[in-house]
Image (cartoon, grey):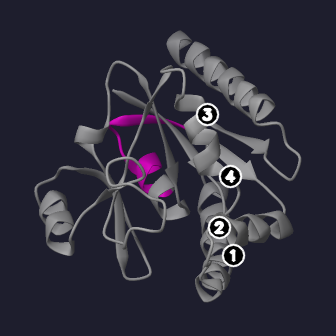
Amino acid sequence: MYKIVALVGKSGSGKDRILRELCADGQYHEIISNTTRPIRENEIDGVNYHYLTNEEFARKKANGEMLETADFREWHYGTSYDNLNEDKINIGVYNPTGYISLLENKNVEVLGIMVKCSDKERVLRQLNREERPDVDEIIRRYSTDKVDFQYMWSYLNDKDNLNQSFVMNDKGADINEVCATINELVKKWLDSSSKE
């Protein structure tokens, strides 16, 4: 059974940076998701995402190659089984819909790490991420996050026995401390699942 650590947080909460730091030493297998959205400035195919056409994505989904999929705006996102490693702890960034899909999949064990950050800091990070940020897109993502995360919390409130924890990654947070906290949470999760 695949083991997945799902980093879940609103846009600009720092999930991608945490992911890069955690994967730097090879302890985790980084899940590189598939998407049909256009590649952004400074992104690299096969590093940030596997950028697929709508037809390629639909074919993978129809062939049962996708562990989870989510639609966001007119774009598709998803994790394919060939992006997972059975011998390591897989770790990836997920939106609420993708996270819920993982929780409903019987082929995986999931530890959800909710990355928290103030709204002000999230917006500032998004504005400073690119030289010419698309402010309309940042505002749209901010508004969408409110709805998506409200839905996710409603869904999670009805569930028992979730493996889920929170970390703060606000302004001034030490990335090494954030990662150390996550590593400790993963260790506890693995220890408890090995006793079951």
Verify CB contact (< 8 Å) between mark 4 and mark 3: no
**Mark 3, secondary structure of its residue:** helix
Label 2–label 3 contact, CB within 8 A: no
Indicate the amino acid at tag 4: Gly
Q: Nearer the viewer, residue 176 or 43?
A: 43
Element type where label 2 sits in the image: helix
Amino acid carrying mark 1 in the image: Lys
Q: Which one is earlier in the sequence, the residue at label 2 or at label 3? A: 3
Answer few, some or many: residues within 10 Å of disc 3's Cα (few below 14, many 20 plus, some between 14 and 19): some
Asked whether disc 4 touches disc 2, contact meaning CB atoms under 8 Å apart, the reply is no
Q: Is residue 108 magenta?
A: yes
Q: Are the residues tagged 2 and 1 within 8 Å (C-beta)?
A: yes
Q: Residue furthest right?
A: 172
Q: Which residues are magenta?
A: 100-112
Foreground label between 1 and 4: 4
Which residue matches tag 3? 21
The answer to which of marks 1 and 4 sits earlier in the sequence is 4
Q: Relative to 93, does residue 27 appear above or below in the rendering?
A: above
Q: Name the element at disc 1.
A: helix
Instruction: Give the CA separation, mark 4 to mark 3.
Output: 11 Å
Tell which circle, 3 or 1, labels the residue nearer the N-terminal end: 3
Viewer can see residue 112: no
Marks 4/2: CA distance? 16 Å
Residue with the mark numbered 1:
146
Inspect the image, locate mark 3, and give the three-letter code of the amino acid beneath it: Glu
